[in-house]
Image: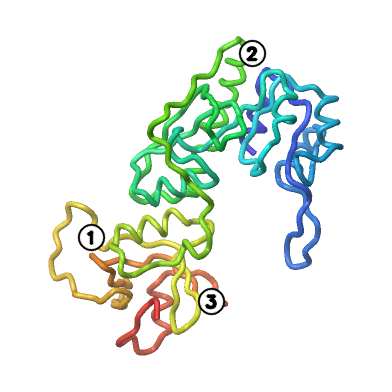
Amino acid sequence: MPALDALVASDHEVVAVVTRPDAPSGRGKRLTASPVALRAEELAIEVLKPQRPRDEDFVARLTEIAPDCCPVVAYGALLPQRVLDIPRHGFVNLHFSVLPRWRGAAPVQHAVLAGDTETGATTFRLVLELDAGPTYGVVTEPIGPTDTSGDLLTRLSYSGSALLVETLDAVEAGVEPVVQPDGGVTLAPKISVEDAQVDWTRPADVIDRLVRGCQPNPGAWTTFRGERFKIVSAAPALRQGEEAEDVPALAPGELLVGRREVTVGTGAGLLQLGQVQAQGKRGMAAPDWARGLGSTQGLRLGD
């Protein structure tokens, strides 16, 4: 919601908010409004919740409102041309990558998975082609060695919100967006639960990036004793530039349990487990989990 709060605090008038319909939530599966809808209601702003953005009632109401420009943040539905044509300055999308790199639903996650050292946010005018519209502005954000996708998205939600307000200022002043370059396009499709499964034959640094890239969603996982086992946090046992002294040889997935650490063999190097979560259990530090296993001889993840 930082974007909504930033827009409300700006000189621009927010006349309505569009968000997803109420969805089942919690154990009772009660219909619950989205956080954006709840915040808009607190601010006494009209909320539109179309099942699909092509619904006639929604199109009619948006046409009646006649907004000058429609800022978009993580809406998640494709807009038909007839809707894109309603605001006279179009729809301006805040996308969490430095376009044209990582077009798609999971740009920050893919940046972490790929080992990028930098990500960012870009504002651009929506067109029918995925994330291909002309751009207005960009902010960048370094990706640190321990950053998760959640960490980066939190930081970008604030810097990106400021960029969105600056972009609307520019649109009001008559600034025209710049066409994206043809080269450098990469795609960032949504990461599935299957994509988040750890392959212990991969190198430790690749698995580290998978864990960080899939945190908090969908969450990296493996199997242990035939049940799903989540890896909430982990790190290579040796960082780049550190010397490997007395490093044990472990097969991929093989566990080595020490007094204060739990280490796993990979295809190249070792991975030290941080927080883990066994199926049906709460999350806990890996050494605490390992103490409840009894004998750890010959144990392996991914069995």
Give the mark toward the camera: 3 or 2.
2
User: Dot 1: few (<14), some (14–19), or many (≥20) neighbours within 10 Å?
Assistant: some
Give neighbour class at mark 3: few <14, some 14-19, many 20+ (Cα, 10 Å): few
Q: Earlier in the sequence, mark 3 or mark 2?
A: 2
**Cα–Cα gap, marks 1 and 2:** 52 Å
Identity of the residue drawn at 78% across and 30% down: 16
Query: Which callout, 1 or 2, points to the residue nearer the camera?
Result: 2
Instruction: Identify the residue at horizontal 19%, vertical 74% (top origin).
Output: 248
Picture residue at 53% right of the left edge, 24% below the top? 134
Apparent side of residue 269 relative to residue 100 in the rendered image (left or right): left
In space, the residues marked 1 and 3 are separated at their CA atoms by 28 Å
Q: Amino acid at mark 3?
A: Gln
Query: What numbered label is drawn on residue 75?
Result: none
User: Mark 3 touching mark 2, by CB under 8 A?
Assistant: no
Question: How far apart in space, not on screen, are marks 3 and 2 (Cα)?
Answer: 53 Å
Of marks 1 and 3, which one's residue comes earlier in the chain?
A: 1
Q: How far across and down, in percent of the image, does residue 289 sit? A: 43, 77
Secondary structure at badge 1 equals loop
User: What's the image's color scheme?
Assistant: rainbow
Mark 3 highlights which residue? Answer: 279
Q: Indicate the quadrant containing the N terminus: top left, top right, bottom left or bottom right.
A: top right
Residue drawn 78% across the image and 53% down it? 32
Secondary structure beneath label 3: loop
Q: Where is residue 157 shown, x and y percent of the image?
A: 55, 37
Q: Which residue is mark 1?
A: 238
Q: What's the amino acid at mark 2?
A: Glu
Picture quadrant of residue 285: bottom left
Count of numbered circles on the image: 3
Q: Amino acid at mark 1?
A: Leu
* Residue under pointer 2: 172
